[in-house]
Amino acid sequence: MNKITLSPTSSGLWHVEGIDCSRILRTSQNLERQGRMADACEYRAEKVQLLLDAAGEESVPLDWNDASSRAALELIYDSALDYFSIDEVEMATALWERVIDFDEEDHLQATVILAFCYVELEDYDCLESVISDISPKTAEYSLLQLWATYRQTGGVERDALRELRTRHKVWWEEFTAEEHPTDEEFLADRQSERPSHKTEAREFWFATAPMWARNNDFIEAVSKA
């Protein structure tokens, strides 16, 4: 394998060189489709570590419009999800922080799931540093307010609950549903240019499901409130 480097361009953004991250991303996705989830996670972790070793402590802005550099960001994000799913929340958090280090525009919206992790880790100083980057008008913000209040007090934040139930009804229905099917309609809409709010809510449920499995009392409390 060629030496992996992060190289500056005339635009001031950086490219990942010496490794084809697009190919690596496709390979990891193919392993998942084959049902080889453990192999996919191990493969991603190995390649992500090589990327991070090459970057060192640098927080250089990667070029989202460069295919390999964009795939590198996606690999780091997906590897964070892998760790998140096996209760390695601190490792997942560190990787999502690196995604933002490399992409200040946060094209993958790592800030959102990172905020939920900070609540689970009870790191409210870090939560305070990112919450302003999440729009108060979004369903994620209302859910985050519910989650943070519950972790801190054991109670349900009534204003956030009302927002979720009324302004973001499909999110409320998704997060209090007994089942979250991956039917053909969902899979097709997921691939469209403009997925429905229902599909976005279900995708976020799947992304955060390991957290709710670890903290099922929260979902029960919100459902019964």
Image (spheres, rainbow, N blue to C red):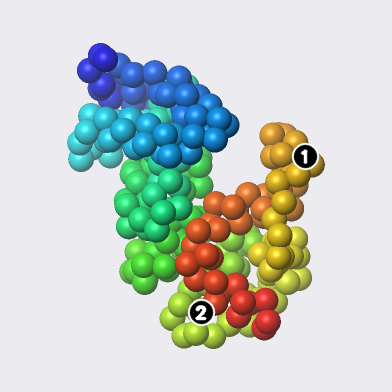
Estimate the x, y position of residue 78 in percent, counting from the top left: 45, 40
| Amino acid under disc 2 | Tyr
The reply to whether residue 97 is in sight is no
Give yes or no for contact between labels 2 and 1 (Cβ–Cβ under 8 Å).
Answer: no
**222 to 73, vertically: above or below:** below
Relative to 206, residue 149 above or below? below
Instruction: Please tell me whether mark 1 sits on a helix, a strand or a loop.
Output: helix
Q: Residue under label 2, please give it.
A: 150
Q: Is residue 94 left or right of residue 215?
A: left
* Position of residue 124 in the picture relative to residue 111 (left or right): left
Residue 67's label in the rendered image is none
Quadrant placement of the N terminus = top left
Q: Residue at x 55, y 75 (%)?
A: 218
Indicate left or right for 149 with 6 as reference: right
The answer to whether one can see residue 91 in this image is yes
Residue underneath mark 1: 184
The number of callouts visible is: 2
On the image, the x and y values in percent for residue 130 come to: 42, 59
Locate residue 35: give its quadrant.
top right
| Residue 120 image position (x, y, % from top left) | 42, 68
Q: Residues within 10 Å of mark 1 (few under 14, many from 20)?
A: few
At label 1, the amino acid type is: Glu
Percent coordinates x, y for residue 14 in the rendering: 33, 26
Q: Nearer the viewer, residue 148 or 34?
A: 34
Name which residue lies at 55% across and 58% down: 209
Residue visible at 69% across and 55% down in the picture = 180
**Mark nearer the viewer, 2 or 1:** 1
Q: Residue at x 42, y 68 (%)?
A: 119
Q: Quadrant of the C terminus?
A: bottom right
